[in-house]
Amino acid sequence: MSVPVPIRWALLLTVALISPVIATLFGSAGLSPETVLQCLAGQCPGATEDLIFYDIRLPRVLGALLAGGGLAIAGATLQNVTRNGLADPYLFGVVAGAGLGAAIVSVLPDYGLLPDGVSLPVAAFIGAWLSVLMVQGLAMSSWARTPEQLLLAGIAMSLMLGAATHMVLYIGEPFAANKVMFWLMGSLARIEQTHLWQIAIPLSIAVMVLWLVGRRFDAMMLGDRAASSLGVHAARMRLLGLMICATLTAVIVAHCGGIGFVGLMIPHIVRQWFGVTTRAVIVGSLLLGGLFLVWADVLARTLVSDQELPIGIITSAIGSVFFLLMMRQRA
């Protein structure tokens, strides 16, 4: 028996609201349900519980919610503008560029240009954007005018920047290399309260813009010629979609490192549950992507006792199984 779409929306919204509260219970220092409820009411029973809940646990859970939603929206947008269900923000060299920036700033001597804890995310953001600008340069040339060529250009850029990152790590100091390698596998341990606004603001702007131009993106799914016949400038809309995708991914990668498969997997599930229109996919991806990453982070914190796994390992493992099941259904 098929569940009506409005009920699916209600269930997804309910679970997305409840899950962050439940997720704050898990971690190396356990919090009881009573303690969590007291802290949510602003009356933590002690200074230790107040520190764990407000400075560590809650920013991390909210960061997972925002990062998961942002990566899923970036993936859905990229899949729409390229008309390719396998398109992923990481294929455009965003993570590779961020990794190169992080590797360079970790290996080079620190001259005190930026405060501690800021240099790595800033360098990662700059590296991610530079990689996107190079892909955009190829897209505006005669080399990559079609969506297929654009994807190939992104893959080539990703491989080139990845090779440069490995070279920098190879010649760099071993401790710094290990630090960058762990960061590239993805982690929400660095998320602080100030970082939440840095992710939430561009994410909110992206959702509003995509909602306003949703019908134009729907037209692009019919092809460039069909979109032009409907009065939609396909090249401009593709550029807008790529800029949104790049900004969201660069901001999230700068703070959370490499978290794969979210932007590739979540939009497929949303389209099956709620339809293929851009507005439905964007809202569904925001909720389901955040929900997915919240629980992936819980697994990363609890699967191994007294040790935290990189969240990128969890998402990649789940994503690979998902696509094997999807391939079996289509066979």
Image: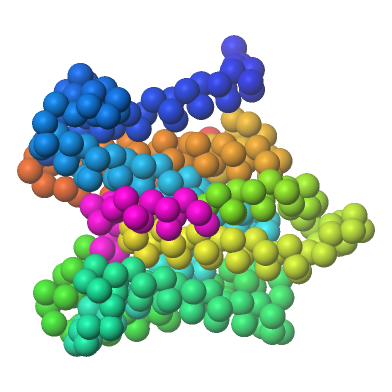
Residue closer to the observer: 53 or 248? 53
* Quadrant location of the C terminus in the rendered image: top right
Q: Residue furthest front?
A: 43
Residue closer to the observer: 127 or 325? 127
Task: Tell me which residue sits at (23%, 23%) in the image.
Answer: 38
Task: Tell me which residue sits at (18%, 68%) in the image.
Answer: 179
* Rendering coords of residue 259 (x, y %): 36, 55
Could you tell me what secondary structure mostly forms the magenta stretch?
helix
* Rendering coords of residue 185 (x, y %): 28, 59
* Quadrant location of the N terminus in the rendered image: top right
Residue 242 visible from this viewpoint: yes
In screen coordinates, is 155 left or right of 161?
right
Task: Tell me which residue sits at (17%, 40%) in the image.
Answer: 52
Residue closer to the observer: 295 or 2? 295
Image quadrant of residue 55? top left
Q: Residue furthest top?
A: 1
In screen coordinates, is 318 left or right of 130?
left
Above or below, 30 against 107 in this view is above
Above or below, 300 against 205 in this view is above
* Rendering coords of residue 252 (x, y %): 41, 58
Task: Tell me which residue sits at (34%, 55%) in the image.
Answer: 194
**Can residue 251 be found in the magenta stretch?**
no
Image quadrant of residue 271? top right
**Can residue 199 be found in the magenta stretch?**
yes
